[in-house]
Amino acid sequence: QAKARGRNGYQFYAPSMSGEGVERLRLETMLRRAIEKNEIFLHYQPQVDIDSGRLVGVEALVRWQSPELGRVEPTRFIPVAEDTGFIGQLGQWVLAEACRQMVCWDTDGLRVPKMAVNLSVRQFDRGSIAPTVAAVLHGAGLAPARLQLEVTESVIMNTGDALEYINDLRAIGVGLAIDDFGTGYSSLAYLKQLPVQTLKIDRSFIKDISADAGADANAEAIAVAIIQLGKSLNLSVIAEGVESEEQAAFLLRHGCSHAQGYLYSRPVLPAEILARWGQGQDKEQHDANEAAASN
Ligand code: C2E
Ligand code: MG
Ligand code: MG
Ligand code: MG
């Protein structure tokens, strides 16, 4: 249909020669070299038990610091990696690095219960990724149960053999979470068949929970509905993007005990996770130490 737009090949190629096309190509070329040049690394964001402040897991979030481009956001380069097929390599690197980090923390005396890693729909293009995941876990020496893979509803609905692939992953013993839950189109009937353990309430529903009169009643109702759904399907529920005490209190009041968000921590380097949560420190202890240090 692109040809119909113009009478000749010149016009056919014109769109890809636009500024945006060139920019994307440049990004792609640089991204392909970024791993070997050590420009790609991971940040980890704590997942906490709201009530006790205990660390229940971390989510690995990929970062790209390019000497030429500066910090490039994952929301900008992940789509490029997906379109170009580079996501396979990138995803595998992320998985291996995240598993390696878990074992490092173990060695340093910090046992992080669970590592959450995001999977892209494109990582299922070549079929089941369970063998790759199993190999990475084996290589790192990490128990499968300590890995939780995050997939979005679109991964599940847009992948032809999604159920089979998800079952393969479950069969090797890794956990599965549905990320950004509530923003996609998964049917509830389908959800019941999936061997997932966790629903992650999308940030958009958490963002509008507040003590103000301007609070979005719809967002609050959806958050509550997701918590209830999780309860009835026997799934654990975690909220993403928790930024305020009001939001945390709301979640706790409605039966969601786990949260992730800036209220607790931004995504940080591994050393920062170790410093804050290592040596058996829990949040209260950490806060007490901080308070003592500043007195
Ligand atoms: P996501 O998996 O839903 O990750 C949560 C995003 O929300 C992260 O953005 C995180 O930094 C941000 N966030 C966490 N808490 C808060 C908060 O309290 N407030 C606000 N405003 N934001 C918060 P980030 O790191 O920029 O990642 C964006 C998305 O990029 C991720 O969304 C995920 O879909 C994708 N992504 C990141 N790393 C990877 C990866 O290794 N592989 C794949 N396939 N996708 C990734
Ligand atoms: Mg995620
Ligand atoms: Mg998410
Ligand atoms: Mg999200």
Image (cartoon, helix red, strand yellow):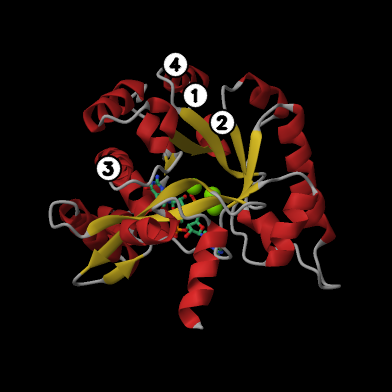
Q: CA distance from mark 3 to mark 2?
A: 39 Å
Q: Amino acid at mark 1?
A: Ala
Q: Which mark is residue 157?
A: 2
- Identify the element where label 4 is drawn: helix
Instruction: Determine whether label 2 and label 1 are within 8 Å by CB.
Output: yes
Q: Which residue is mark 1?
A: 162
Marks 3, 4: nearer the viewer: 3
Instruction: Determine whether label 3 and label 4 are within 8 Å by CB.
Output: no
Of the numbered discs 4 and 2, the one sitting upstream in the chain is 2
Q: CA distance from mark 2 to mark 1?
A: 7 Å
Q: Position of residue 183 (x, y in %)?
A: 64, 46
Q: Is residue 269 above or below residue 134?
A: below
* Number of residues whose C-alpha sits closer than 10 Å to that of mark 4, classed few (under 14), some (14–19) or many (20 or more): few
Q: CA distance from mark 4 to mark 2?
A: 20 Å
Q: Which residue is mark 3?
A: 107
Of the numbered discs 2 and 1, the one sitting upstream in the chain is 2
Q: CA distance from mark 4 to mark 1?
A: 14 Å
The answer to whether one can see residue 3 in this image is yes
Q: Amino acid at mark 2?
A: Met
Q: Residue at x 49, y 24 (%)?
A: 162
Say which quarter of the image contains residue 17.
bottom left
Disc 1 Cβ-to-ligand 1 distance below 8 Å: no
- Identify the element where label 3 is drawn: helix
Q: Residue at x 59, y 54 (%)?
A: 53
Q: Amino acid at mark 4?
A: Ala
**Quadrant in which the N terminus is drawn:** top left
Marks 4, 2: nearer the viewer: 4
Q: Position of residue 101 (x, y in %)?
A: 29, 45
Q: Which residue is mark 4?
A: 171
